[in-house]
């Protein structure tokens, strides 16, 4: 019998994985299934799958309101306006990604979303984002600018959110921000080297 789940880290570190097809019967894809798949370029989903869809090789839920995985070959990517959430690890190890444009109604940036996006240079955080989760931009070593407007709803920045962002020049923290977690289990700070 065919499995209906793509389990946690099942393809983790598969650097040779370039193409992925999601069949009709797959009902669950764990958010860490493709961690470290830095050469994944093509994602397609069977049209009859009731839970998932793909557009321009990007994996989404069926209604395309949640972005689950972006392939690694994009240098610039515009997240569609209907997307209100981005899954944990969605852009993890997309080493070519220089610029990403987030939609205005996005509410959270998940754990390790942009982890190891070594080419990412700047990011505009949409005003509706209330939390930037643990490790969201960790090891984005070329990230210079994080643009957060004065109208931002941002309330929390979790541990390691910008850890390893050694090129970071400027970040504006809005008055709404209530909590900036500074240290995780290993003693590294949110903005540490």
Image (tube, rainbow, N blue to C red):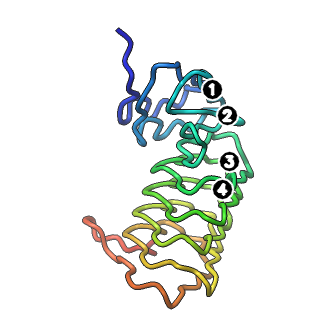
Up/down of 105 relative to 147, above or below:
above
Q: Which mark is residue 57?
A: 2
Q: Nearer the viewer, mark 1 or mark 3?
A: 1
Q: Which residue is mark 1?
A: 44
Say what secondary structure mark 3 lies in: loop
Q: Which residue is mark 4?
A: 119
Q: Residue furthest top?
A: 1
Are the residues at dot 4 and dot 1 in contact (C-beta closer than 8 Å)? no
Q: Is residue 94 above or below residue 179?
A: above
Packing grade of label 1 (10 A; few <14, some 14-19, many >=20) is some
Say whether disc 1 or disc 3 marks the residue closer to the N-terminus. Answer: 1
Q: Nearer the viewer, residue 64 or 166?
A: 64
Residue identified by numbered label 3 = 96
How far is disc 2 from disc 3 in space, using C-alphas? 15 Å
- Disc 1 + disc 3, Cβ < 8 Å: no
Badges 2 and 1: C-beta atoms under 8 Å apart?
A: yes
Disc 2 residue crowd, few under 14, some 14–19, many 20+, Cα 10 Å = some
Choose mark 4 or mark 2, whichever is in front. Answer: 2
| First in sequence: mark 2 vs mark 1 | 1
Q: Are marks 3 and 4 in contact (CB under 8 Å)?
A: yes
């Amino acid at each position: 019998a065919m499995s209906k789940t793509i389990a946690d880290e099942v393809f983790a570190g598969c650097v040779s994985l370039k193409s992925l097809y999601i069949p009709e019967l797959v009902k669950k894809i764990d958010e860490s299934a493709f961690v470290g798949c830095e050469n994944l370029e093509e994602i397609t989903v069977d049209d009859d799958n009731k839970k998932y869809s793909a557009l321009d090789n990007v994996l989404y839920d069926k209604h395309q309101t949640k972005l689950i995985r972006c392939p690694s070959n994009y240098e610039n990517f515009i997240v569609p306006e209907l997307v209100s959430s981005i899954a944990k690890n969605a852009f993890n190890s997309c080493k070519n990604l220089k610029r990403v444009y987030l939609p205005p109604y996005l509410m959270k940036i998940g754990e390790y979303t942009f982890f190891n996006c070594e080419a990412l240079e700047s990011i505009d955080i949409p005003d509706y984002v209330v939390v930037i989760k643990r490790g969201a931009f960790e090891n984005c070593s070329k990230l210079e600018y994080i643009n957060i407007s004065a109208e931002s709803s941002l309330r929390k920045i979790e541990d390691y959110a910008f850890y390893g962002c050694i090129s970071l020049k400027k970040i504006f923290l809005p008055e709404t921000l209530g909590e900036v977690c500074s240290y995780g289990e290993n003693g590294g700070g949110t903005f540490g080297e």
